[in-house]
Image: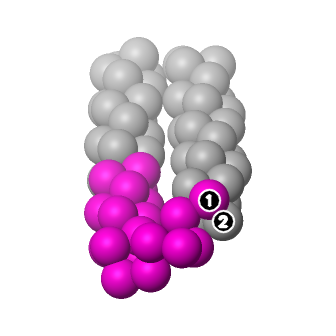
Amino acid sequence: MTGTLAAIGAGLVTIGASLGIGKLAASAMEGIARQPEAAPKIQGAMIIAAALIEGVALFAAVICLIAK
């Protein structure tokens, strides 16, 4: 039973991370479209934020799998 719950938790983590990165990328593209001269700063911030989201998602997935 706990294995099933861990798999569901890992799936939810994956969905949450993908939604977060999708929102991040969409907002960054909109910002670049509005201010093309700010593209390097926006891209740098986007890459850092995406890495942080991935890190948290990986940590949560590992916790879900260890908890079973």
**Which residue is at 57% across, 38% downward?**
54
- Residues at circles 2 and 1 in contact by the CB criterion of under 8 Å: yes
Mark carried by residue 23: none
- Could you tell me residue 12's position as x and y percent? 34, 42
| Few, some or many residues within 10 Å of mark 2 (<14, 14–19, 20+) | few
Mark carried by residue 41: 2
Single out the residue that lies furthest toward the front: 37
- Could you tell me residue 49's position as x and y percent? 62, 55
**Which residue is at 36% across, 82% downward?**
34
Q: Which residues are magenta?
A: 20-40
Tell me: 23 left or right of 57: left
Q: Label 2 is placed on what type of residue? A: Lys
Q: Label 1 is placed on what type of residue? A: Pro
Label count reads 2
Instruction: Residue 53: say if magenta.
Output: no
Residue at numbered disc 1: 40
**Which residue is at 41% across, 51% downward?**
21
- Could you tell me residue 43's position as x and y percent? 57, 55
**Which residue is at 35% across, 44% downward?**
18
> How far is mark 2 from mark 1, CA to CA?
4 Å
- Could you tell me residue 42's position as x and y percent? 58, 65
- In which quadrant will I find the C terminus? top right
Tell me: 44 left or right of 22: right
| Few, some or many residues within 10 Å of mark 1 (<14, 14–19, 20+) | few
Q: Nearer the viewer, residue 8 or 38?
A: 38
**In this view of the protein, can residue 12 be seen by the observer?**
no
Above or below, comparing residue 64 to residue 57 in the picture: above
Query: Of helix, strand and loop, which mostly describes the magenta segment?
Result: helix
Above or below, comparing residue 21 to residue 42 in the picture: above
- In which quadrant will I find the N terminus? top left
Tell me the element at label 2. Answer: helix
